[in-house]
Amino acid sequence: MQGYNGTIFAYGQTGTGKTFTMEGVDTPELKGIIPRAIDWIFNSIKSYPDQNFLVRASFVEIYNEEVIDLLNKNIKNKLILFSVVLKKFEIINFNFLIY
């Protein structure tokens, strides 16, 4: 818990289990990677009661060369992907969940 940035990336053909792997279902033994990671982060934060933490999370989907912000209720709002420097890309105008 010393200030890390992380990315969880699922890639593959339609119907191969990416969503199930990432999200799982609402039972402890079938939780996906995302709820397990969130549980771990917030359980770790509880062990440092005298410190303040900032947790930011985004949830995007790239499909058919379009980037979609899955935290935005307006699903028609496409995100902009642009190259900052050669081989480095940045997504702009998307939402963060901040805790």
Image: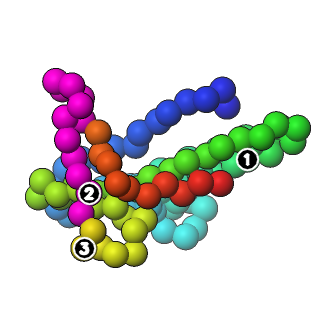
Residue type (three-letter) at the residue carrying disc 1? Asn
Q: Mark 1 points at which residue?
A: 43
Q: How far separated are the C-alphas under marks 1 and 3?
A: 35 Å
How crowded pointer 2 is (Cα within 10 Å; few <14, some 14-19, many 20+) is rated as some
Query: Which segment did they paint magenta?
Result: 78-89
* Magenta stretch: includes residue 80: yes
What quarter of the picture does the N terminus occupy?
top right
Tell me, yes or no, whether the two marked residues, 1 and 3, touch with CB atoms within 8 Å. Answer: no
**Relative to 62, is 95 on the left or the right?**
right
Between discs 2 and 1, the one toward the N terminus: 1
How crowded pointer 1 is (Cα within 10 Å; few <14, some 14-19, many 20+) is rated as few
Q: Can residue 85 be seen in this view?
A: yes
Q: Which residue is drawn at 88% across and 38% down?
A: 50
Q: Residue at x 22, y 46 (%)?
A: 81
Q: Mark 3 points at which residue?
A: 76
Between disc 2 and disc 1, the foreground one is 2
Along the line of sight, the residue nearer the viewer: 7 or 24: 7
Q: How far separated are the C-alphas under marks 2 and 1?
A: 32 Å
The quarter of the picture where residue 27 lies is bottom right
Q: Can residue 34 be seen in this view?
A: no
Q: Mark 2 points at which residue?
A: 79
Percent of width and height locating residue 40: 64, 45
